[in-house]
Image (tube, grey):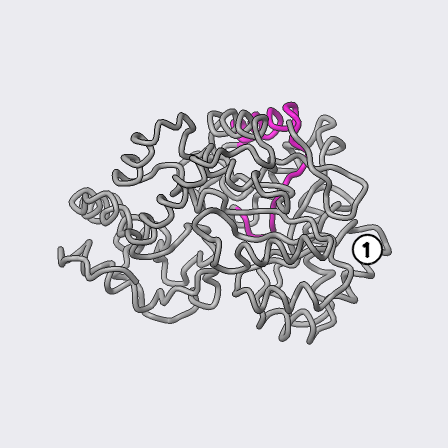
Amino acid sequence: MKYRKFGGLDWEASVLGFGCMRFPTLDGNQFGGKIDEHDATRMVRHAIDSGVNYIDTAYPYHEGKSEVFLAKALGDGYRERVKLATKSPVWLIKERGDFDKYLNEQLERLQTDHVEFYLLHGLTGKTWRETVLAHGIIAAAEDAKKDGRIGHLGFSFHDDNKAFREIVDGYDKWTFCQIQYNYMDTENQAGTDGLRYAASKGLAVVVMEPLLGGRLSSPPRPIQEVLNGSGISRSPSDLALQWIWDQPEVTVVLSGMNTMTQVEENLLSADGSGVGSLSAEERDMIGGIQRTYESMVPITCTKCGYCMPCPNGVDIPENFDLYNGGFIHDDVARSRNSYSKFMEEKARASACIQCGECEEKCPQKLKISELMPEVHAVLGEEKPYRGKE
């Protein structure tokens, strides 16, 4: 395992962190299924035994069960071998006292009296101003640092670069931040500029969605043809991960692993990581892949699940995944078959009532209420795709 200095702390984090949003489930339902505790425990402990020392979870992951499960998985002495990060559900905070209420609930779930790293979850410019600043959340967090419940304060982020700089500059005691970053998000959200800006301020930068919700791991045919013709032997996943680790401003790359095979593959990638590890030919090839992908994907959903649960039962990420898959793989018939035969009717795009609740939570700022009828038109009524959104 390779390690990197964590911002201004006298501590080094493993370059690979374990993201606890996509554990294997007993029924295969990624966002709502019961965690397969046997397999998930084996995965977490194997990662720790292999040198991973940064574990990341959050209040809503696995419908609130991720933290509860981790308390068990980190038993038998494993808790003492890692730094634990979890996140405050900022969207639920209506007054200052709510910060402590949710933090204390999380500590109870995790069966610990402290977490080393605590993040304000999914900040935007709006939630920074209207929740964090308006309700004195920074002061509440500082009190929690003083009494030992949290060690260091950071934030995860989903907005534009302007808002990112506003938040970084809005508090001079951030230890770290967490951003969505991969070779398709260089100018999206915080982007490369945000990565470098945060690092220049002394913040450790934790990267989430390094594989864009898994999409960069299983490239469509045009992308695979580029890879096959390049003479480069790296797997698509390894190439995407190495692109991130190649940048010195990156501290930890989180992977939401849901099979032991993924754990093993990511551990191997981490062992081979390093600044300058990519060749000029590999960087050039990634540039070509970026341009090809940008021209292909119609709806830029990462399947992060932040929009879930839908109050009307629509499985938003799955609908978008079927729509995108049919488009970029040139196999709309398969997507239509899955839509009609394997999705419950209440989960289909046709059940959307355009309430707009999901749009407030979508990190990509997708116009979900407008897109759902389009998805149903293509997958349910067999109309042609209308093109890129």
Corner quadrant of residue 12: top right
In which image quadrant can residue 378 be found? bottom left
| Left or right relative to 300: residue 82 | right
Query: Which one is nearer the viewer's eye here, 16 or 344?
Result: 16
Q: Position of residue 197 (x, y in %)?
A: 64, 58
Residue 314 horizontal side relative to residue 201, left or right: left
Relative to 333, is 129 above or below? below
Give how far across and how far down residue 19 sits, in percent: 57, 41
Q: Is residue 53 rendered magenta in the image?
A: yes
Camera sees residue 361: yes
Q: What is the x, y in percent for residue 4? A: 69, 37
Residue identified by numbered label 1 = 145
Q: Is residue 39 magenta?
A: yes
Q: Quadrant of residue 126?
A: bottom right
Q: Looking at the figure, which quarter contains the C terminus?
A: bottom left
Which residue does the image show at 63% across and 65% down from the upper left?
165
Name the residue at the right extreme: 146
Q: Measured from the top left, where is residue 279 in percent x and y? A: 49, 33
Query: Which of these two is toward me, 90 or 253?
Result: 253
The residue at the point 65 percent across, 31 percent down is: 52
Q: Foreground: 374 or 188?
A: 188
Q: Which residues are magenta?
A: 37-61
Tell me the amino acid under the disc marked 1: Lys
Report helix, strand or loop for mark 1.
Answer: helix
Q: Is residue 35 visible?
A: no
Which quarter of the rendered picture does the N terminus lie within?
top right
